[in-house]
Amino acid sequence: MSALTKFLVAVAVSASTAVAFTGDMTHYTPGLGACGRVNTASDPVVALSRAEYGNHANPNNAPVCGRWITIHGNGRTTAAQVVDLCPSCASGSIDVSPVIFDDIAPLDVGRVQVTWEFQ
């Protein structure tokens, strides 16, 4: 087996073992997030539950800050950047900016079941 083939097999295996989360997705109006950045309703951003965000003395330094997630729901897919903490979200649930929620469902729905994973 060539080095390239071994590499491609390793990439395929690691991609297929990505951890998927399941929960509710709601929307909020972003502002100054726990990661220390100011965001708006038109920014593609997400707040994670405490379980996924972690508990850090300085939340600005959380390892999840700036990471992107892929969100799947209602037969649609979108991506958002982690910029905030959602203290009221259950594990697996996320709170997203209106522009991201609208990619999956109309805003007036308010809450929708999704799966998501880190990119």
Image (cartoon, grey):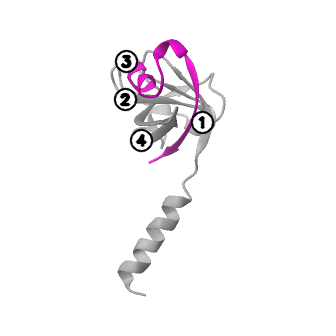
Tell whether 51 sits left or right of 44.
right
CA distance separating discs 3 and 2: 8 Å
Can you tell which quarter of the image residue 2 is in? bottom left
Q: Where does label 4 land, which residue?
A: 68
Amino acid type, residue under disc 2 in the picture:
Pro
- Decide: few, some or many residues near mark 3? Use Cα within 10 Å; few <14, some 14-19, many ≥20: some
Amino acid type, residue under disc 3 in the picture:
Ala
Amino acid type, residue under disc 1 in the picture:
Asn
- Decide: few, some or many residues near mark 4? Use Cα within 10 Å; few <14, some 14-19, many ≥20: some
Pointers 2 and 4 in contact (C-beta within 8 Å): no
Q: Earlier in the sequence, mark 3 or mark 1?
A: 3
CA distance separating discs 3 and 1: 25 Å
x then y, percent, for residue 19: 58, 51
Which mark is drawn over residue 41?
3
Q: Nearer the viewer, residue 74 or 96?
A: 74
Q: Is residue 112 magenta?
A: yes
Secondary structure beneath disc 1?
A: loop
Secondary structure beneath disc 2?
A: loop
Tell whether 108 sits left or right of 113.
left
Residue located at (37% from left, 18% from top): 41
Can you tell which quarter of the image residue 39 is in? top left
